[in-house]
């Protein structure tokens, strides 16, 4: 902080010779003031460069694995796998809610809460590093706006979290001979929206704006970080299905019901624990990519820019254009509006 000198006039009525002499001998003080001024720009320069470094690298460091290491020490299990779980998209008026589960054994510099990584290209870069890291395993569950309106946003979020965890545990089973629990496939052209909504944890090859309802995408890497084709029919030992124990660390203060493994909630876990931070990036980037696609399908709302959040510009466009199929009709102010089949506003009581 720069210091400003304040000039004060001395009262001459009571001024003694001694005080006047002190006033005239003020050169050392001027020197100190000038020294401070010379130093100020240097401090200011450092202040300017620090945010730049933080914003671009966030990091030569990543979040710690504090709770993960505690659990592995307490349980003394070399085969214990820690699953980080987080979500993205609870607050927007449009688009899906996305939950991710991640097992990432490799420390990747820059992994932290996705909300603290302000540059979208940086999140994209970290996403690619996560899904190409050695022995990584991940699953991302998507629930669309219709599901959110049907069961509410909290339940849709918790269900997506559970589906993601269930899927990440089942990944080895997909590849085990005679133990195929799920099918990884592309969306059937005959699937209608009702079937899509009822599919629950059905696996898809990739997230897409052309898929409605609830589904999961997942992946797994080998020791070199090369992706393993989950539908390739590769065979593992029959005992692989029970070779791991799992413990999920879930961001927030609630746990989904009927979790397929031991689990605990961790408030602000996405800024405290490495596995949850990695999951937060997978969820955020997956959802952002979907919103970019929706922006092309439903132009005019600015979805690419605000990602469906209730900005003033977004709400103005809703009142002008009506609601698209991906808008959440149970969220205010949309819940106070009536729409026709095409999404046009019939009545607005907001």
Image (cartoon, helix red, strand yellow):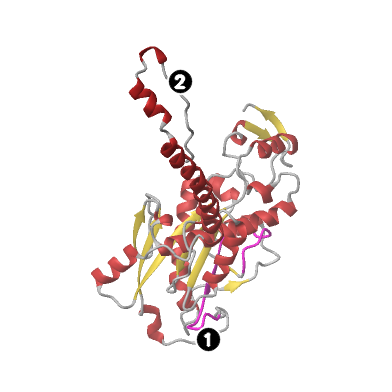
Q: In the structure shown, which secondary structural element does the residue marked by tag 1 occupy? A: loop
**Can residue 160 be seen by looking at this rendering?**
yes
Picture quarter containing residue 239?
bottom left
Picture quarter containing residue 27?
top left
Residue at the image point whose x is 55% and y is 84% from the top:
233
Q: Where residue 222 appears, x then y in whole percent?
A: 50, 82
Per the rendered image, the range of residues in magenta is 206-226
Whichever of labels 2 and 1 marks the residue nearer the N terminus, that label is: 2
Q: Where residue 325 appears, x then y in whole percent?
A: 68, 47
**Residue lying farthest to the top in this orientation:** 13
Residue at the image point whose x is 60% and y is 63% from the top:
124
Q: In the structure shown, which secondary structural element does the residue marked by tag 2 occupy? A: loop
Quadrant containing the C terminus in the rendered view: top right
Q: Which residue is mark 2?
A: 9
User: Does the residue at mark 2 contact the one at mark 1 (Cβ under 8 Å)?
Assistant: no
Q: For the residue carrying disc 2, how many other residues have a C-alpha within 10 Å: few (<14), some (14-19), or many (20+)?
A: few
Q: From what the image shows, is residue 21 above or below residue 230?
A: above
* Residue 213 shown left or right of residue 5 in the figure: right
Q: Which residue is mark 1?
A: 234
* Residue 227 shown left or right of residue 62 in the figure: right
Distance in Å between CA atoms under marks 2 and 1 = 89 Å
| 221 drawn magenta | yes
Residue at the image point whose x is 61% and y is 57% from the top:
120
Q: From what the image shows, is residue 44 above or below residue 106?
A: above
Q: Nearer the viewer, mark 2 or mark 1?
A: 2
Q: 165 or 253, which is in the foreground?
A: 253
- Find residue 170 and name its label: none
Q: Where residue 254 appears, x then y in whole percent?
A: 38, 50
Q: Main secondary structure of the magenta part?
A: loop
Q: 259 or 101, which is in the foreground?
A: 101
**Residue lying farthest to the front in this orientation:** 17
């Amino acid at each position: 902080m720069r210091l400003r000198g304040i000039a004060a006039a001395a009262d001459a009525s009571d001024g003694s010779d001694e005080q006047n002499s002190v006033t005239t001998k003020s050169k050392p003080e001027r020197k100190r003031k000038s020294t401070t001024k010379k130093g100020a720009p240097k401090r200011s320069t450092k202040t300017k460069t620090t945010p730049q470094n933080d914003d671009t690298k966030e990091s030569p460091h990543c979040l710690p694995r504090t709770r993960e290491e505690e659990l592995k020490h307490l349980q003394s299990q070399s085969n214990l796998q820690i699953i980080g779980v987080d979500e993205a998209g609870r607050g927007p008026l449009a688009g899906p809610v996305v939950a991710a589960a991640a097992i990432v054994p490799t420390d990747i510099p820059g992994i932290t809460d996705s909300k603290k990584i302000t540059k979208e290209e940086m999140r994209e870069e970290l996403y690619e590093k996560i899904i190409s890291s050695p022995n990584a395993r991940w699953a991302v569950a998507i629930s669309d706006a219709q599901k959110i309106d049907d069961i509410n946003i909290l339940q849709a979020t918790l269900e997506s979290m559970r589906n993601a965890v269930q899927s990440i545990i089942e990944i080895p089973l997909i590849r085990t001979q005679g133990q195929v629990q799920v099918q990884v496939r592309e969306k059937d052209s005959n699937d209608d929206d009702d079937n899509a909504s009822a599919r629950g944890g059905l696996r898809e090859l990739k997230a897409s704006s052309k898929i409605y309802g609830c589904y999961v995408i997942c992946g797994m890497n080998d020791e070199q970080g090369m992706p393993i084709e989950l539908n390739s029919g590769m065979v593992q030992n029959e005992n692989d299905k029970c070779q791991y124990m799992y413990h999920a660390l879930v961001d927030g203060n609630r746990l989904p019901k009927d979790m397929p493994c031991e689990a605990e909630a961790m408030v602000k876990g996405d800024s405290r624990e490495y596995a949850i931070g990695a999951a937060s990036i997978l969820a955020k980037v997956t959802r952002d990519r979907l919103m970019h696609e929706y922006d092309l399908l439903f132009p005019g709302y600015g979805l690419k820019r605000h990602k469906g959040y209730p900005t003033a510009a977004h709400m103005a466009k809703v009142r002008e254009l009506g609601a698209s199929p991906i808008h959440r009709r149970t969220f205010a102010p949309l819940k106070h509006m009536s729409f026709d089949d095409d999404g046009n506003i019939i009545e607005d009581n907001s």
